[in-house]
Amino acid sequence: MSFVRLFATTLFFLVTISASISAECKCIDWVEKISSAELESIRYVPIPADVTAHPFEKRGFVEVPLDYSRADSPKIKIFYRLLPVRGSTVNDTTKPILVSINGGPGISSAYGRAVDFDYQNSDAKQNENDRFKFLSESFRILMIDQRGTGFSAPLEPATPPYISPAIINQYFGPNLQALDHAEVIKKVIPKGEAHFLNGQSYGGRLMLHYLAVKDRPTPTGIIFSSSALPFRDGIKASVERRQSQLTLNLQLQEKFPDISVRLDHLREHFRENGFPPESVNHLWMLLGKGPEGVWQEKMVKKITELQAANRKELKKFIDESAEGVSLLNYVLSSAILHPGFTDLTMSEEVDRLLPLERWMINEQWTLVQVPGGDRVLAELLNEIDKTPPPEPSLGQLNQVRRLLYGVETLFTFGEGDAFTPKDTFLPLAQAIGIKKHSTFTVLPGGHSALYWETGHKAVLEWIRDKKLDRH
């Protein structure tokens, strides 16, 4: 059967099943009116009292309404960190500010630079994954925890009763996250001061919503880095994402021909310590993360470390790797990254259309796990699977393009990107971009390409070429 015929048959099957399920089940009302009492009863993870104290960073909170449209809305606090230029301070106004709008959804900004980053010891172990190693040579970095994550009203995820998916849909999505970012920028960056926005991965979608905010601060320029952009076929994009990960698995095998044996040994090590052997799939976050050759070395180094790890260390790896796999992530991913599907239904579809070999690292497995086998959460996810949330409206293509009129924009994509393949998203960027104001570049380094030295140089060249340093 040809791929086209298989695709058409599968899509017809899914539509038919979806229609049948909708007729039989009680569907989630994603836009139901949420009472003030329900908003007041949302549970959040407690925030450490000393989180704003830091000798090198400027840290703080900005109080915002949970619902900007309601006078009786509860208040929440949005956490931010202003990182200094390397070798200088946050008060060095000779260096512009780069606002980092991080990916996810559901991942804290600490993914870019750890909260306990050691500024006095560059060789400290917690500094190994510092995304801003190069960009902080030229910019002060403003990091903002998106509402519901990190230290910004982090949702209590661990125990029932779980937060209503409708509340997540209405109050923790990109529309309100964009308003939060505007409020933080107003507080931290003096009016008229040069600053840039960088929307990484999911953050690119959030940045589009930010551009639609009325009376927002005007950025000097914006950067879409490996961004998830609208106006694409969800199935096609997901299959191409899987194809990219298949290619990277094969590149890993080419560099290390015994990789399947190494992974089998690690599977057994997980099993012996009481974890599912498939926990090796949490390594998917390292696929393609870095220049060719470098990321494979880092992957095998991590496999070797895990093979020698004890149970406590293995659990820490699993917990850290699964940080973004939450109810918040499940709802927002379903609405934004593959509309009409959930992580589960899209995973099943992708596995059918493009299966991986057994030894390969498979992202899909990690996305559909129910922590601890929780039956209450499983049933809630089942309800979401039957009625996926609606996609947040950004309007038609021309309406999105109007947001970019007059805005100097850099679109960057990574070679070997396992998450937003350039062959899928570069054409979308070119459709959205504005002639004479949009620059497009492909960089080595996969999904995190902008954060490597070549990405830093590309940003500086764009600023110089567009004369944005004279703002």
Image (cartoon, rainbow, N blue to C red):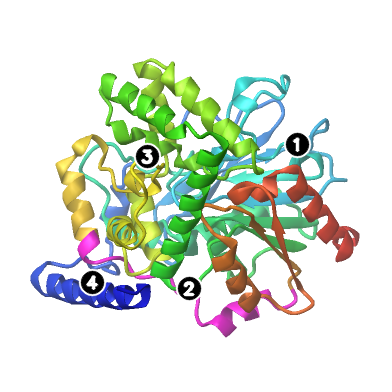
Image marks 3 and 1: residues in contact by CB distance under 8 Å: no
Residue 403, percent from left and from top = 63, 76
Query: Which quadrant does the N terminus fall into?
Result: bottom left
**Amino acid marked by disc 1:** Pro
Position of the C terminus by quadrant? bottom right
Which residues fall within the magenta stretch?
A: 385-406
Tell me the amino acid under the disc marked 4.
Leu
User: Could you tell me which residue is drawn at 38 percent across and 23 percent down?
Assistant: 314
What residue is pinned by disc 4? 14
| Label placed on residue 359 | 3
Please, what secondary structure does the residue beneath circle 3 have? Answer: loop
Question: Is residue 392 shown in magenta?
Answer: yes
| In front: label 2 or label 3 | 3
**Separation of marks 1 and 4 at Cα, in angstroms:** 51 Å
Is-magenta flag for residue 166?
no
The foreground one among 391 and 304 is 304
Q: Nearer the viewer, mark 1 or mark 4?
A: 4
| Residue 214 seen by the camera | no
Residue 47 location, x and y as percent? 45, 33
Q: Amino acid at mark 2?
A: Arg
Tell me residue 368's x, y (percent). Answer: 29, 48
Q: Which mark is residue 84?
A: 1
Q: How many marks?
A: 4
Q: Name the residue located 8 percent from the left edge and 71 percent from the top edge.
A: 24
Residue where numbered disc 2 is placed: 232
Q: Is residue 256 left or right of residue 73?
A: right
